[in-house]
Image (spheres, rainbow, N blue to C red):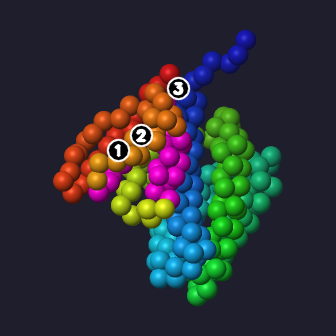
Amino acid sequence: MSEPVTASGQADATAAEAVEQHHAELAAALSWRREALSTAAAARRYSEADRAQLALSDWCRSELVPHALAEEETLYAAAAQRPEARLLVEAMLAEHKVIVQLVDNLAATTEVQNAAELARALEVVFTSHLAKENEQLLPLLVAAPDVSVTNLLAGMHQLIGHAQDDLQVDSRVIPHRIRHKAIFDALDRLRPGQRLVLVASHDPLPLLAQLRERAPDTYVVDYLEQGPDTWRLAFLRPKD
């Protein structure tokens, strides 16, 4: 007979899901910013590449690095107290140093091709790092009877972002060449019951047509604002 799920256990599982959702949001944000830099650098559009490099560097320092530091003070500190997790925590702390160094190098380089290579390396390392957190660290903490993931995360917006609110994507700041891909990537990461709000400068009818072909009957779309300067649409992935 399986063990009953306690209220505290369910709360911890929900808290861990909030962290995983924030991880998905960070991964998506890093992906399209890296794509914008790589595309501009490959096409030798140097002014555009410089802007993309600055935008990525600023985002890393304001969002990605604070997230990593908050993890060290909470999730990692709790996991390090458990003998079975110490080697994992040591490895992940080492990866944080690599991530911070890549961010520093990205901000410092004056060569756009080098910036694009650093951004790609950052995405690869960060993606692998998130997988370890989602698949190893968080389950270990949720299963620990003497650890409250809910209490660890209380008030830690760096770790869970605004996971209880709608995810918002402002298409106006995404380069046109990768705009639809970035939006589709964000939609793909929605879980049942979650909603994404898209902000656009026009009615995104071509995007909606592509979405119907790509994922028919997957999302419920509702117009929240209809011009003339700003359009806002909500995409809900219904619960099963």
Dot 1 amino acid type: Leu
Q: Is residue 199 left or right of residue 159?
A: left
Q: Residues within 10 Å of mark 1 (few under 14, many from 20)?
A: few
- Taking the image as drawn, is residue 178 in sight? yes
> In the figure, residue 38 lies in which quadrant?
bottom right
Which residue is label 3 attached to? 7
Question: Residue at position x 59%, y 62% from top?
Answer: 68
Q: Position of residue 59 (x, y in %)?
A: 48, 68
Q: Secondary structure at mark 3?
A: helix
Q: Which residues are magenta?
A: 178-201
Q: Residue furthest left?
A: 228
Q: Is residue 67 left or right of residue 200?
A: right
Q: Residue furthest bottom?
A: 110
> In the figure, residue 139 lies in which quadrant?
top right
Q: Is residue 130 above or below residue 190?
A: below
For residue 209, which numbered disc appears in the image? Answer: 2
Q: Residues within 10 Å of mark 2 (few under 14, many from 20)?
A: few
- The mark closer to the camera, 1 or 3, is 1
